[in-house]
Image (cartoon, rainbow, N blue to C red):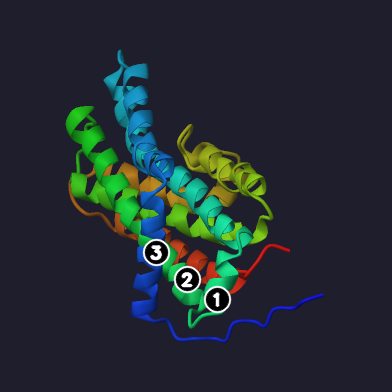
Amino acid sequence: MSTTTPAPTRALSASRTTATAARVLRQLRHDPRTIALMVLIPCVMLFLLRYVFDGSARTFDSIGASLLGIFPLITMFLVTSIATLRERTSGTLERLLAMPLGKGDLIAGYALAFGTLAIIQSALATGLAVWFLGLDVTGSPWLLLLVALLDALLGTALGLFVSAFAASEFQAVQFMPAVIFPQILLCGLFTPRDNMHPVLEAISNVLPMSYAVDGMNEVLTHTDLTAAFIQDTAIVTGTALLVLTLGAATLKRRTA
């Protein structure tokens, strides 16, 4: 039985990271369905949501900002986990790590590539919600865009991390009910978190999506930059960086 030698630890390199990101973007350019899923689906979902609540603009205002952060997180999680797993099952990852490319370079390159698409996705979704669908935001739309972007990056980080534990694309999709759905239920979208059972509230306090929704609500209701908003965005950012670090540590060359 053949064995693989673990890749040596290498310092993170800007040139190797950008080269990896460029390669991923070139591959995605030839996959229009994936690009459509990442860029257009959140916009379509927000458009449908607006007219589902056509008779109640206040309802759309109350949950539209939260979903503006949740939709990008979900799509980036799904696409990133499957794309990374595909690299491993096809043998591409094993060949790449045999080159002068560390795990950190690979994870950072993926994060940079999908982060670029996340910027486009978040900008389109935020622009659609605020300037076309009439989402009433008290604070700056730029802060809304910032939270949407951080949520998309968090979804990218979570997708990269869970891909290490899946043996097939079907298994990668199965992680969504385990990782994403509980956060949707407990993030405060359906009911304020302080109205939940104390145990559920305690669980929600350690879930990053809770702070993503809280950050969106801060922009929705406050004109100025608040300490709560800074805390919420810092937690989302810190979680994304932590998960990316764990993703680099758990990345496997190939599927067993």
Residue closer to the observer: 37 or 32: 32
Q: Nearer the viewer, mark 2 or mark 1?
A: 1
- Residue 153 position, x and y percent, is 40, 56
Q: Position of residue 136 (x, y in %)?
A: 22, 32
Residue labelled with disc 3:
23
Counting residues from the N terminus, which is met first, the one under dot 3 or under dot 1? 3
Label at residue 38: none
Say whether marks 2 and 1 touch (CB < 8 Å): yes
Look at the image and tell me in which quarter the N terminus lies: bottom right
**3 and 141: which is toward the camera:** 3
From the image, tell me which residue sits under label 1.
97
Q: Earlier in the sequence, mark 3 or mark 2?
A: 3
Residue 124 position by quadrant: top left
Could you tell me the amino acid type at mark 3? Arg
Residue at 31% across, 17% down: 56
Mark 1, Cα crowd under 10 Å, few <14 / some 14-19 / many 20+, is: some
Residue extending furthest top?
55
SS of the residue at dot 2?
Answer: helix
Q: Is residue 165 left or right of residue 45?
A: right
